[in-house]
Amino acid sequence: MGQGSVGSGGFVARPDQVSLGVLVAAVPRFKVDEAAAVCGVAEQRRGGKLPPHVTAYLAMALCLFSDDAAEEVAQKVTGSLSQFGVWDAAWAPPTSSGITQARKRLGRDVLRETFYRVAEPVATGETRGAWLRGWRLMAIDGFDLDLPDSAENAAEFGYAGNDQSRSAFPKARVVAVVECGSHAFIDAEVGPWNRSEKTMAATLLSSISNDWLLLADRGFYSFAAFSAAAQTGAALCWRAPTQLSLPVLKVLSDGTYLSALVDPRLRGHQREELLQEVRRGTKPDPAAAHVVRVIEYDVPDRDGGELVCLITTVTEPESATAAELASAYHQRWEEEAANGQLKTVLRGPGKVLRSKIPDLVHQEIWAYLLVHYAINSLICQAATGADIDPDRISFLRTLNIVRRTATGTAAFPP
């Protein structure tokens, strides 16, 4: 079966699920109100000012219609918002400057707090491609976004490169956790370009769930990061960096072998003594070492062949075969697909964000993450109902359906 729209495989989404209802369903009004209250943003509409919940949905609509001016977006969606109790047709239509002022009042934190309250894994036990045995497949990775070249954005986010050869625009860095089966972002950290992905990931690793199999590329490995993730009880399958020492402790029946990741602060005699204890079957203190299973295989079609070395906390071949784990690791590319959906399809290729000041940059990025989450929640629901892999439903076609059905201007008084 080729890619289909939301109606593929006999599943037909209701119109209210596909229009702006896709945002209201995935990002309910009460969650936005809770986030605004936690962030100390006023809840009442006074003097014709847009209230926080309306501004939040308009910020998301600006991401849904990234090609259009702010005032045009408001004209497109206020009728649909009215259907969901988010807009009052008696209100005066907002201007671009009014929307900008409302966004400034909303600030950088409300949509981040909203995201934390609504984003969660969306695949069910019946969703194809979402699981390896009893583990939910998750991945962590990063991407960057170009920002308007304002002095404020440059000061907070910085440029890629150096003074001799720097990027044309300031860049924000985003590190996110994605559910592989649904492509939904469920956790994220936003920061300046000069903050490394590894550093940003550290804030996400301690909150992962013990029913996950977390996948990560070699750029995310450090002993501290692996330890933080392992101590949550989640299963891990990470690609090992080339320079990582992996002593062979025991060769297993399937050709994989057990090794130990040792705190790099332990050297010489201390390290060898610890490895000897592990060889004798002593379980190491997780603050000092972790026993892992090493899976090595070749990828023959990459520049004449590439050796991939995986380290996993799934140490028993009976729990997951080497082939299963290698296949699962390549599901990490689903994160790359999710990044592309947000950067290229939803935002548009080669585009900079709208926001010229850092507070609104943060707000806009969280709005994009929320819109992306809402659309992929709908796709996953449709695919699960049709018993097909969510990969088979086109994000672009679904986005276009949402855009076409999201418009509806409110009946403004003269």
Image (cartoon, rainbow, N blue to C red):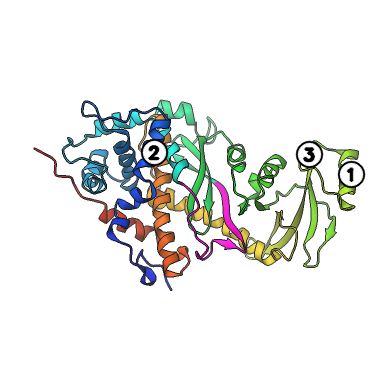
Left or right of 373? Residue 313 is right
Determine if the magenta segment contains residue 122.
yes
Kindly check if marks 3 and 2 are in contact, taking CB atoms under 8 A apart as contact.
Answer: no
Q: CA distance from mark 3 to mark 2?
A: 40 Å
- Front residue of 334/168: it is 334
Q: Which mark is residue 408?
A: none
- The spot of residue 338 in percent (x, y) is 48, 53
Residue type at the position of mark 2: Glu
Task: Please tell me how many numbered marks the rendered image carries.
Answer: 3
Residue that numbered label 1 is attached to? 272
Residue type at the position of mark 1: Glu
Of mark 1 and mark 3, the one earlier in the sequence is: 3
Q: Which mark is residue 364?
A: 2
- The spot of residue 97 in percent (x, y) is 25, 30
- Front residue of 186/40: it is 40
Residue that numbered label 3 is attached to? 264
Kindly check if marks 1 and 3 are in contact, taking CB atoms under 8 A apart as contact.
Answer: no
Q: Assign the N terminus to one quadrant of the image.
A: bottom left
Q: Secondary structure at mark 2?
A: helix
Question: What is the span of residues highlighted in magenta in the rendered image?
Answer: 119-141
Q: CA distance from mark 1 to mark 3?
A: 12 Å
- The spot of residue 335 in percent (x, y) is 53, 53
Left or right of 274? Residue 398 is left
